[in-house]
Image (cartoon, grey):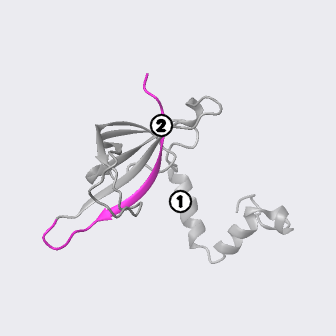
Amino acid sequence: IVPSFFVKAVVSTQSTGDMCKCVDYQTLKLQEAPDHIPTGDMPRHIQLYVDRTLVDKMVPGNRVQVVGIYSIRKQSDAKEGKKDKNITAGIRRPYIRVVGLEVDSSGPGRSLNKFTAEEEDHFKKLAERDDVYDLISRNIAPPVLCVDTTALTKNDGTI
C-alpha cells in the first residue's frame, strides 16, 4: 500500500556566478493526505528536493506519487544561533531527492481546466468588448449589488 500525499511548495532559482551553470530547483514539503489520517493525528511530512525538468510540475494541493532517493542531511546550527561550531548535536533531517513523479489529476479540484474551442471563442469575444469590466462586475453577484439581471442579458439570453 502506497500512501497518498499532497504537496506544499516553495519555488527557488539558484544562481552562483558567471562560471557556474544555473539550475532550477524546488524545495517541497510532501505531506500525508488528510483523508488518510486518523482523527486527532497530525499528518506526517518529509522534505523533497526537485531540480531541472521536474520543477513546476506540481502545485500546492496536488496529490502525487514520487520516486526518489531517501537521504539525510545534517541540520545546521547556524539558524539557532549556536556560537560553538565544534559541538554537533547529531541531528539529521531526512529528505527525498526526486528522480520521478506522477501528478494525480483525477478527482475534484485536481484536474487542469480544459476549455472547449467554443468556450475559448466566447472568452475571446468577451475580451474584445469595451465594456468587459462592467459586464463581468455586474454578473458576478447581481443580487448583492442590487442590479436588475434582466438588463444584463441580450434579447437571446446571452451575455
Q: Estimate how packed mark 2 is, as few (under 14), some (14 to 19) or many (20 or more) residues with alpha carbons within 10 Å.
A: many
Residue designated by label 2: 5
Residue beneath the point at 84% across and 62% down: 143
Residue beneath the point at 35% across and 57% down: 77
Q: Estimate how packed mark 1 is, as few (under 14), some (14 to 19) or many (20 or more) residues with alpha carbons within 10 Å.
A: few
Q: Horizontally, is 123 left or right of 154 in the view?
A: left
> Which one is closest to the eye, mark 2 or mark 1?
2
Residue designated by label 1: 121
- Residue 98 or 59: which is nearer the viewer? 98
User: What is the residue that sits farthest to the left in this orientation?
Assistant: 19
Earlier-in-chain disc, 2 versus 1: 2
Q: Is residue 14 magenta?
A: yes
User: What is the residue that sits farthest to the top in this orientation?
Assistant: 1
Residue beneath the point at 36% across and 46% down: 48
Give the magenta range: 1-20
Image coordinates for residue 156, horizontal then vertical, percent: 74, 59
Residue 25: quadrant of the picture: bottom left
Q: Does the magenta stretch include residue 159?
A: no
Q: Which amino acid does label 2 sit on?
A: Phe
